Amino acid sequence: MPNHLLELYQNLLAEFGPQNWWPAETEFEVVVGALLTQQTRWESVEQAIRNLKAESLITPDALAGADRGVIEECIRCTGFYRQKGERLQLLSQYFAENGLSEILAKPVDELREELLSQKGVGPETADSIILYAAHKPVFVIDAYTKRICECAGVTGGYDALQQYFEESLPRDTHLYQEFHALIVRCGKEYCTKKRCDECIIVASNPITARV
DNA sequence: CACCAGGTTGACC
DNA sequence: GGTCAACATGGT
């Protein structure tokens, strides 16, 4: 039985090349970006991170003790800036008090549970942090992944899709990182407006061998 | 001017 | 246990 998912990965890689995700200079920057990119264009997140850097607010300690108004101004361009401001500061306090590297070093299950208990951190944000900041193999399911799966005939909620990807692929951090990055890259170019009509890559890779 | 973006939460069946 | 408005700015 052919592994359609692995074939899809190989074809996306051949088409777009290595993506080298996540675009960030530090692990904490991944955390910040993961929270800010919720329901927002990445370009806006980049601007917000530049703003935070200009205020030297890109470490857990600095953000934890920063003035909320200053944070809000920095991240305004990402939308939902009030609740994101509060959640970003709470999350920073959590990392500042418990130690960034200590937290990220925890076993995956414990880490995921802890992240999910933070306000504003749902499955995708938690998994993005685990995969791209803690470098541990969990597959990130985002809007593009759901879209591509739907176009290919695979449906399901977050947990079901994640289980499908993780069962179908070797448990490899770098593979998960690049595959997710490629899905987003492909989605940005072909799957706009909730459809992937012109996506030859996905359309030619039926991954319907499930459910 | 309408719709959408690398989601999450809390309220209400 | 599922569904749904609210959250808010900037781009097309």
Image: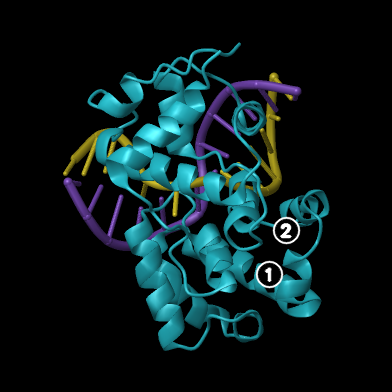
Chain colours: A cyan, B yellow, C purple
Residue nearer the viewer, A69 or A142: A142
Q: Mark 1 or mark 2, which is nearer the start of the sequence?
A: 1
Please tell me which residue is depicted at 47% across the width and 48% down the height of the picture.
Answer: A178
Vertical side of A206 occupied by A15: above or below: below
A116 displayed left or right of A85: right
In space, the residues marked 2 and 1 are separated at their CA atoms by 8 Å
Say which chain tag 1 marks: A
Residue beneath disc 1:
A90
Say which chain tag 2 marks: A
Are circles 2 and 1 on residues that touch, CB within 8 Å?
Answer: yes
Q: Name the kind of residue labelled 2 in the image.
A: Gln
Residue nearer the viewer, A56 or A82: A56
Question: Mark 1: which secondary structure?
Answer: helix
A95 displayed left or right of A195: right
* Mark 2 Cα shell of 10 Å, populated few (<14), some (14-19), many (≥20): some
B8 displayed left or right of A32: right
Question: Mark 2: which secondary structure?
Answer: loop
